[in-house]
Image (cartoon, rainbow, N blue to C red):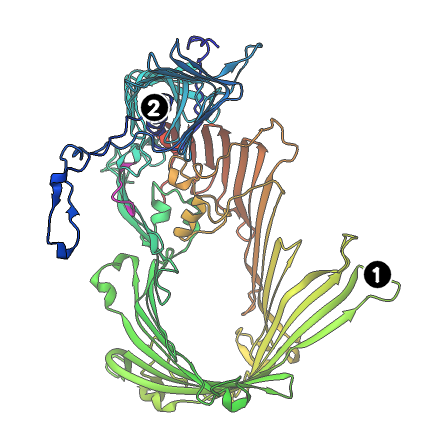
Amino acid sequence: MAIQKPSHTFTKIHLKALRTKSFHIVFTLSFTMFINMFCLAQELPKPKDPIKPKPINDSTLVKVDSLLGPPIAIKEVDSVAKDSTVKKKETLTDIVKYKAKDYVSLNQRLQQTTLYNQAEVNYGDMTITSGIIVIDHNKDLVYAGRLKDTAGVYSQAPVFTQGQNVVEPDSIIFNTVTKKALIFNSRTEQSGGTIISDITKKENDSVYFVKDAKFTTSENLDDPEYYFLMRRAKIVPGKKVVTGLANMFIYDVPTPIGLPFAYFPMSKKQTSGVIFPTFSQDLANDRGYFLQNGGYYFAISDYFDLAVLGDYYTNGSYGLRLENNYAVRYKFNGNLSLRYENLINSERGFPDYSKSTIYNIRWSHNQDAKANPNSRFSASVNLGSSTYYRQSRNQVNLSNSQNNTLASSVSYSKTFQGEPQVNMSVTATHSQNTNTEVINMTLPTFQGSVSRVFPFAPKVGTKKGIIENINFQYNVRAENRIQTTDSLFFKKEMFDDARIGALHSIPVTTNFKVFKYFSMSASANFEENWTYNTIRRYYDQDLETTVTEDVTGFDRFFTYNFSTSIGTTIYGMFDFKKEGKDPKIQAIRHVVRPSISYNINPAFDQYYDSFDIIDANGTTREEYTRFQGSIYGAPSQNFSSSLGISVGNNFEAKVRDKDSTATEPKKVILLNNLNLSTSYNFAADSLKWSPLRVSGGTTILKDKMNINFGATLDPYALNNNNTRVNQFNINNGGSLFRLTNANVNMSYTLSSDSFEGSSEDDAAIQESIRSGGRADDLFGKPQDFADKRLTDDDKKDKEKENPELYNYKIPWSLRLAYAVNYSNSRRENEISSHSLMFSGDIELSPRWSVGASSGYDFKNKGFTLTQLRFERDLLSWRMNFSWVPFGPYNSWNFFIGIRSSLLKDLKYDKRRQRDQQL
């Protein structure tokens, strides 16, 4: 069969997306190798005549004494027979196999080998299949292309495979001598982008030249939404693309967005580079124009990186951020973030001029469980200025502005295996109230414990009875507590009021069965309290006031208490199923867990002192304990002998299943728990009964709604001063109990079956949790559309298969959270808080989604933080708009840009910052 010209037969090359860094090099080298192997297989040289052995000359025989045996022949060494040159390694190291469905033709006159229809050549791990393969031995050219049927339809495009690499061009012309090639209509993937070229010239193993090529990140390569037209370009696979004049086309329509020359780094390795900033204008606070999130990324190693980012405003304000991530597989991973902002409002000389600095430090460290099973180090740090989340001009996490607490913890724990086992841990904690700016820290907290020891347990078998179950353990906890304010944080004054103490405890317990169905336990707890901070109190007659002085030095006190408890479990079943009837509710099971406990706490009067107060009313004696300021509390002066009563309940029902094929009824939880508890103090002079506490919870609506409630009921009445008196409320003309406080919390989550919402693994949610925010979006979603670290578009493709213009099932989701608290401890009779939070998302079409987060405060009669979200999936592009329409955080953010991280800096970002908070 005659070979058509390349311009007709070999017109296009379809190179499917091959996710390798430099598949062109692998393809051409491997293609060259197997073509050479194939050519060698056609013309193998005939073996030369074998070398005849040289006869042995008689002169080489050496005569020896006949007593030693016959003469021995010694062959002379021929220096010519042994070639000293190193033999070349054979070119063919494996068998070349080739076949074709129709025929394999060898044309001696044209010096061509033709494989036609389903042609295939195999050599080692290399395979090429094509409609036709022609090898021109005279011109040292190899052609591989498709077949054209009578209807003019091409089929059987070349497929080159080596290992896991697959290349599918339309046609190729390859010179086996110069190693150059022409590839027609190629599609080449380079680091997430695709280069579409009609003609590609392979210069050598690592350089390609293209003309009028298209560069795009679109998934639809037949009709890309956009592309950059490169007039002339040089490609180094896996490294770079250098082009001359290039401009953007949107659906084949040219745009003025372009560059006279461009450089595209194509390395898939972690590389350092410039991070382009976002340009905008701050209209709310008169800071002028600004550049945000610009800086440099340092790819320090495979385990450690660093991003240095900065902001600058034309009025002089600036910000600096250091973002670090690190990870060592099977050992640990974490991230560190340092943020600092110097904010200037208005202009110097104006009455509203102000200047402030804010900062925030976040650190997260996690150790792999397999790294060391006996020790663990972890960190979760979120500290800084109390006003950071409310004043920061570049804070993407809007929801964190509603948080009132910043918390941190850094801990190291160690386990010493053995019998008994010893555990120890050292922890530094931090808790910061952003409203009061009060900071509480422990630097550090040491905890140690020895596992339970059963001195009377048998060496083999189970423990039985009161004696064999006696056990004790040892615990110690030592702290250095610091309470300071935001203004004194990281200053030496913060350590002035530090308090140090240690608590040693040895609990001794046992448990056993009574009357077969009752479980009984008894315990004694011994505590030794060490402290370095005590007080001394006296009355100063000159000042006529009581003076309290702090005393620093070691001091101690010892306390102990006893307790015992007995409990059981009662099962009740109410069966509604009768013979011949099948009611919907077939049975209700009620589980009751009653428990009675008795506690004795002695009085430790020996640790109390007294002093006289002499004033106009006479002499009054006042008692106090010097351990009043101890971090673990002071010894009790009052003897306590109390009886505790608690009852736990659980209600479940068996209902008839709607599925007629089900053989068993369905179990439904009516009340997951309903707990009641109170106590009676025999040693108290008055108010012997403690308030009755009620708590419970359940789930309904197929476990989508959680309901939790609680209440406190006081049996005693109040006098005219709203003080509890030793008189039952029912005897005072009231009810049996007086409701002092109550609370109800409900949460409800529902969605359509086709909705795929965000989870805690979402990058934005993780950002919220790192900053101390919620794991849901009831306070809004953290969004910075220009920051790819808060999106997972590279991990999950939002492109839907066969997208519909109209979706008859609209995906949606709704989240509700309701909370109400009632207070009446001193006849307030008021709702202290009452709110409803809600958030939801709805996909109006496969590419349009709308979301909102808001809430309503019924007590203050106003809406909470409200956020509206709009998102449009533009295939290779994405468009987002976030809007807080009212309130102190009124702002909006608009973004449109390319989805791929390769061209993430090609974007338009416009935003209005929220107003200044004074």
Query: Which residue is tagged 1?
Result: 582
- In this rendering, the answer to whether 669 lies above or below 790 is below
Viewer-closest of 260 and 550 = 260
Amino acid found under the numbered disc labelled 1: Asp
User: Is 258 contained in the magenta span?
Assistant: no
- In this rendering, the answer to whether 644 lies above or below 39 is below
Q: Quadrant of residue 663?
A: bottom right
Q: Is residue 300 left or right of residue 839?
A: left
Q: Which residues are magenta?
A: 294-304
- Mark 2 crowdedness (10 Å alpha carbons): few <14, some 14-19, many ≥20: few
Question: In the image, which disc is placed on residue 635?
Answer: none
The residue shown at (39%, 80%) is: 420
Horizontal and vertical percent position of residue 133: 44, 18
The residue shown at (44%, 13%) is: 11
- Considering every residue shown, the one lying at the far front of the view is 66
Q: How many circles with numbers are drawn on the protein?
A: 2
Horizontal and vertical percent position of residue 870: 50, 34
Horizontal and vertical percent position of residue 497: 26, 69
Query: Which residue is tagged 2?
Result: 44
Q: Is residue 100 left or right of residue 378?
A: right
Q: Secondary structure at mark 1?
A: loop
Q: CA distance from mark 1 to mark 2?
A: 90 Å
Q: Secondary structure at mark 2?
A: loop
Q: Quadrant of residue 692?
A: bottom right
Amino acid found under the numbered disc labelled 2: Leu
Residue 534 seen: yes
- Mark 1 crowdedness (10 Å alpha carbons): few <14, some 14-19, many ≥20: few
Viewer-closest of 800 and 565 = 800
